[in-house]
Amino acid sequence: FKKCYKRVVSNSFSIVQKAFVVNTRWQALILKRANTDSKYDIWDLPGGIQDFGLSLRDSLGKLVRKDCSLNLTIISIPLNITSYIQDGHQAVRIIYLCRAAGTVSLNSNHSDHLWIDPVDHQHYAFPDEGYHSAFSNYLSHSSIASVEFLGPGLISTTNEPVS
């Protein structure tokens, strides 16, 4: 029992959620890491590690507000799910297709933001290939994603009426 218990305690696991936010022109929001970050030349999507005790929706909404001050209005289909192990820590990252309201205002973890045409994603360095897969999946299914899923949303919506 002790051996098994130590193995469970020594390993850690988290869920990382990212928001693939598209605006009314179907451009995707990307954030550049701050110059103080060792990977400052890397672009990212808003989000982070799931907060314990919060629902997936509430946690992602909180993380996006913290990163860039946007309020998620629709959280829809996952565009990419990746599992990875880094420095003895296992994580599952889910990148959701989202819509948001508000004006981008970055926190100190980020130095810049861009709204890019998703076809241009290859011109930007992301942490790993899973991000590029999310862009490719969005592009492959953008007409379905835009009309079907970003209409009423799948996970839930906020105060916007469903038509």
Image (cartoon, rainbow, N blue to C red):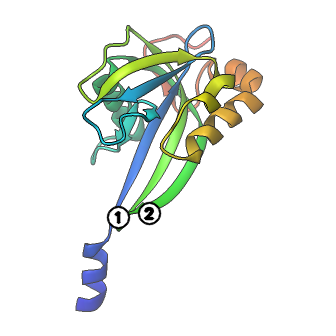
**Secondary element at image label 1:** loop
Image quadrant in which the N terminus is located: bottom left
Q: Is residue 1 visible?
A: no
- Whether residue 29 sits left or right of residue 88 in the image: it is right
Vertical comparison of 75 with 128: above or below: above
Amino acid type indicated by mark 1: Asp
Location of residue 134 in the rendering, given as x and y in whole percent from the top left corner: 62, 37
Q: Position of residue 29 (x, y in %)?
A: 50, 21
Q: Nearer the viewer, residue 160 or 67?
A: 67
Label 2: how many residues lie within 10 Å, few (<14), some (14-19) or many (20+)?
few
Q: Which mark is residue 101?
A: none
Quadrant in which residue 111 is drawn: top left
**Which amino acid type corresponds to the residue marked 2 in the rendered image?**
Ile
Give the SS element for disc 2.
strand
Number of numbered callouts drawn: 2
Residue drawn 43% across the image and 13% down it? 159
Q: Residue at x 64, y 41 (%)?
A: 133
Q: What is the C-alpha distance between the residues marked 1 and 2?
A: 7 Å
Question: According to the image, label 1 marks what residue?
Answer: 87
**Residue 24 figure quarter:** top right
Quadrant where the C terminus is found in the figure? top right
- Residue 43 at x, y = what percent? 46, 32
Residue 161 shows up from this direction: yes
Residue that label 2 marks = 85
The percent position of residue 113, horizontal first and vertical second, equals 42, 18
From this view, report whether residue 124 is shown above or below residue 131.
above
Left or right, 131 with respect to 40, comes to: right
Question: Is there a contact, CB below 8 Å, between mark 1 and mark 2?
Answer: no
Residue 6 position (above or below residue 16): below
Foreground of the two, 46 or 124: 124
